[in-house]
Image (cartoon, rainbow, N blue to C red):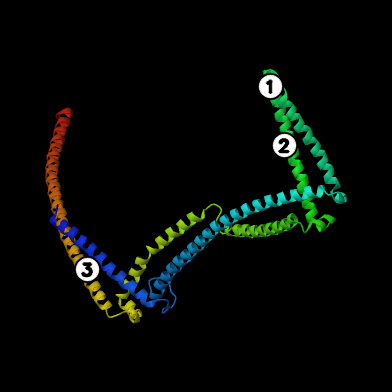
Amino acid sequence: MDERKINIQDLEVNNLADTEARNRLLEGLGEAIFRRIGEDEPFQAEVGNTPGGILADYRKLQREISESQELIKTLETEITRLKELEEEINSGEEEQVKLEKELEEVYVRLGKQILLTPDLNDFSGIFRQQEQILLAKIEEQEKKVRELEEREGNFLTWLGKNAQIAVTKAFLSKNQSDLLRVYRSTGEKAFSVESPVSSEWKSSDDAVNAGTLREKLSTVSVNLAMLRGERRQIGGLFEADISPARRIQGLEKRIAFVFEEFPGIHLRLGSLAVEDEGRKALYSFLADEDNKVLENAEAIKNKIAEREQEIAKIKASINIDNEKADIEKAKKAIAGHRLKITAAEEAISQLDKQIAESEKHIEELNNFIKGPGT
């Protein structure tokens, strides 16, 4: 390989390294200038590679990062609150179920007491009728179960007996549940409507307990409604097809991407500071320690320019040699063509001579054909 081409490669590698070093210097300078500018807006809003344009681009990146970070904080806060709400709602629902069960037990006891009081027939008449019907059914089914259990027989009888017992017990269980509902309805209606019962029983322990439980249930229900409303409101902040965690990841990736744009912005401002016009515009933000940076940047720039000049000269030298080689090649081609021309001319001369001899011979033959005296 031509040693000059190796020299060009070495010079280009050195220039690349110096260019990177110079860019790092100017990035640092630009970053320092941005810090000194701070929150001020010393330049007229512009676009392009001007102090105002570069600062505007810098502010845009800052705003995007700040807005994304604030949104992440908001999302994280809402996620935390959403988890808290889920826990509070689950706890409230458990409390609600517990209170409803306790209240139901109180209503059942109240209902039984009311149905045992003859003075309340006007109020409890319809409930007592339902009670009597269900008690009769329950008694009948319990008796039937006892009879079936006492019945003896062969294997087939035993299978039939078990099937009848299962069916009877199912009806028995249903009637027992219905009876509890009658007692519960009696107690609930007596407590919740204006009636002789509510007036008569309001001082009893069960009535007082029922009132307390109802108040607690009301409070729990209202609180649950508020918590569920807040949960719906927070859920509405999140996009339906993107989970909050994925949205935060997307924002974090965007922030990382934007941060990668800052070195370029720093370099643009630092590069502007080494130019005459840019240095004038940024003069009030340049410090004494920047002089060394500017000098080093200028020295590296000159060194790069010198190498570029040297590379251009080497390439010119190579081009000269290439041109000389092309000239020699052309000269050889011309000489070859001239030899071919000489050979062609000699061949043409021989052919002309041959033509002349052939024409003379033709003339002689024509004269012979015509004969003497013709």
First of labels 1, 2 by sequence position? 1
Q: Which of 64 and 249 is in front in this view?
A: 249
Residues at circles 2 and 3 in contact by the CB criterion of under 8 Å: no
Q: Nearer the viewer, mark 3 or mark 1?
A: 1
Secondary structure beneath disc 3?
Answer: helix
First of labels 2, 3 by sequence position? 2
Q: How far apart are marks 3 and 1 (CA)?
A: 111 Å
Q: Which of 195 and 154 is in front in this view?
A: 154
Q: Residue 5's image quarter?
A: bottom left
Q: Nearer the viewer, residue 221 or 24?
A: 221
x 49%, y 60%: residue: 76
Question: Residue 218 location, x and y as percent?
Answer: 69, 58
Image-based side of 86 in relation to 321, left or right:
right
Query: For the C terminus, which image quadrant?
Result: top left
The residue at the far bottom in this view is 284
- Residue 173's disc is 2
Q: Residues within 10 Å of mark 1 (few under 14, many from 20)?
A: some
Which residue is disc 3 drawn over?
Answer: 305
At label 2, the amino acid type is: Ser
- Residue 158's disc is 1
Secondary structure beneath disc 2?
Answer: helix
Q: Which of 220 and 58 is in front in this view?
A: 220
At label 3, the amino acid type is: Ala
Residue 79 visible somewhere in the drawing: yes
Image-based side of 156 in relation to 323, left or right:
right
Image-based side of 329 in relation to 240, left or right:
left
Q: Which of marks 2 and 3 is in front?
A: 2
Question: Residue 354 location, x and y as percent?
Answer: 13, 36
First of labels 3, 1 by sequence position? 1
